[in-house]
Every structure is written in C-alpha cells, then in structure tokens.
Amino acid sequence: MKNDIPDFQTIMLPMLKLLSTGEKMTLNEVMQKLTRHFNLTDEHLKIKVPSGQMGLFRNRVGWTRSYLKKAGLIAYPERGVYKITDEGKKFLETNPSKLRMKQLENFPKYMDWRNTFAKNTDRKSEEIEKNNQTPDEVLESTIEEIHNELATELLDKLKENSFGYFEKFVIQLLQKMGYGNFSEEAATHTGQTNDDGIDGIISQDRLGLENVYIQAKRFTSGNVGSPDIRNFIGSLALQGVNKGVFLTTSRFSESAIRTAKESKQQKIILVDGKELTELAIEFNLGVQVDKTIEIKKIDLDYFEE
C-alpha cells in the first residue's frame, strides 16, 4: 500500500495544475484535492514517515511545495497559503507532460537557490530519480537537505522583516558568537538615518578598548556592490577604526569582494546570506531543536576477547 503513495516528484505537476486558477489555497485544501487526484484512501493517509511523526503523503506534499517555491513556480502570500506565480502560469502554458527535479534546473530561481545553499551537497537530479545511494549516503543527503531548507526559511524570514530588525539580529548573532557578550554596554545598535553608515558596534574586549563596527544590509534582491564596500570603508575611516564586518541577506559581487580584500587600512569581513544563516543555525539564533537522532555503530572493542 505504501508503494501506491506517489513520490514528491510525481506530485509536482498535479499540484501546480490545481493552483492554476490563481486562487490562494491552504495546505489542507491542497491535500484534499491531491488525495482525490491520486485516489488515495484513509488507509493511505494513515501511513507515517519512519519517525512516525507525520503522514507520509503529507510529508511528500510538503517537499513538493518546497521545491516548487524554490523554482519560483508558486509563492506563499500568507502563512500556510499557496498561490501560483506568473512563472508557474507560463510553464503550464507549454502543456508540460511532466515536472521532475531535472526540469527544475531550467528555472533560474531554482538554480540560484542551489548555487547558494546546495552547490556542493544537493543530490543530482539523476541520483534522486534512480535512488541508488547507500543508506548512509541517503541519510547524509537527507540531513543536508533539511539543513538547507531551514537555512532557506531563515533567510526568507530575515528578508520579510524590517531593516531595523535585521540590524538588531546581526548584533545578537555576534553576541552569541562571543563578541560583546560580557556586558549590556558591549553591543550597541546605532541604526539611525545619520549613523554615518554604521549600524552597530561590538566590543572585542571586556574594557571596550577595541571595537568592531558593523554594517547590515537587508537586500531582497540584487547583490552588494563595490560602492557599498567603499562607503563602509569610508565610514570606518571617519570613526578612526580599522575593523569592520559587513553582513547581508544577499551576496557580494566579485568587485565588492575584491574591494574588501584590497583595503589596506581597514580589515573588512564579508558575511553573505548563506554564511549568515549557517552562523545563525550554529549558534541557535532564530531556530530551535526539533528532534535529536542517535546513530549507533558496533563497538568492536567490546567484542575483543
């Protein structure tokens, strides 16, 4: 009976088609329509994932939804609500016969996501379809996929919130990393209209003898360019300091990276959206532990006679 439940790739095209009217739908509405489409029974819906914490079909629909969003074919206009995008409508106008991981590579937004979060770890489309990996490889790939999904959601949330919120977020992150965590005064949020390009100040030592200045840029699109870095270097020079951290939800252009490296008087550290989310996950800012899984192996020493 488990084999009757479609895999997440098989669900892709039917899910996109049922959203083709342009109406917003909740997850429950999507589930009901897909259940009827695939002729699934209540017994099918009772089948759980190995952990037993979620229905198998619901879990696969969730991954389908996630990949469609990564490709820019659907959007989440509200929490728990889904809607087809103009890109999704254009794709359906081609009368596609299928939509699987390989086809997603034709969409720039999906490739942009993969190049940002899963350049070295995302399983190839062919590997996913053939599923010829060992259990250890599947487990590692799955953990990495879940991690990348968390990083994506975290970055989306940072882009949705205000500029002021993002500035405070990066200061809290640096505090959790050990900068300025010895007193309330050791971290300062300066985000004002006349802050001379400085969004925060973090003390490196207990007495505040050496400070690190922060610039936070919450970009929803585009890259941080060389002019932004030059402006930040100029702001540091005005303050008479030589250390700065530039953090963004976006990425840095090659010229921006080069400008930071070529700076002689100031040491500039660049933290892009990917690294920012990695640090936030590592230091548990904006995330929480969902579950802990123990992987055990044989203790060969125990069986030595």
Image (cartoon, helix red, strand yellow):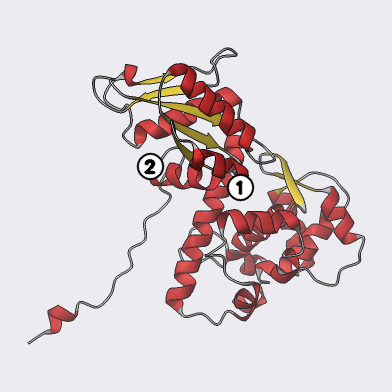
- Give me the disc on residue 134: none
Instruction: Give whichever of 167, 154 is nearer the camera.
Output: 167
Picture layout, residue 85 above or below residue 180: below
Instruction: Give whichever of 181, 25 is nearer the camera.
Output: 181
Residue type marked 2: Phe
Badge 1, how many Cα within 10 Å: few under 14, some, many 20+? few
Residue 66, image x and y in percent?
Answer: 65, 55
- Give me the disc on residue 254: 1
Q: Measure how far apart labels 1 and 2 are at the Cα level.
A: 28 Å
Q: Which residue is mark 2?
A: 283
SS at badge 1: helix
Residue 195, image x and y in percent?
Answer: 54, 15
Picture layout, residue 191 above or below residue 221: above
| Residue displayed at 32% across by 26% down | 180
Badge 2, how many Cα within 10 Å: few under 14, some, many 20+? some
Quadrant (top left, top right, bottom left, bottom right) of the N terminus: bottom right
Select label 1 or label 2 by which is in front. Answer: 1
From this viewpoint, which residue is outermost toward the bottom?
Answer: 305
| Residue displayed at 51% across by 80% down | 133
Q: On the image, which quarter does residue 119 sit in?
A: bottom right
SS at badge 2: loop
- Horizontally, is 136 left or right of 152 in the view? left
Residue type marked 1: Glu
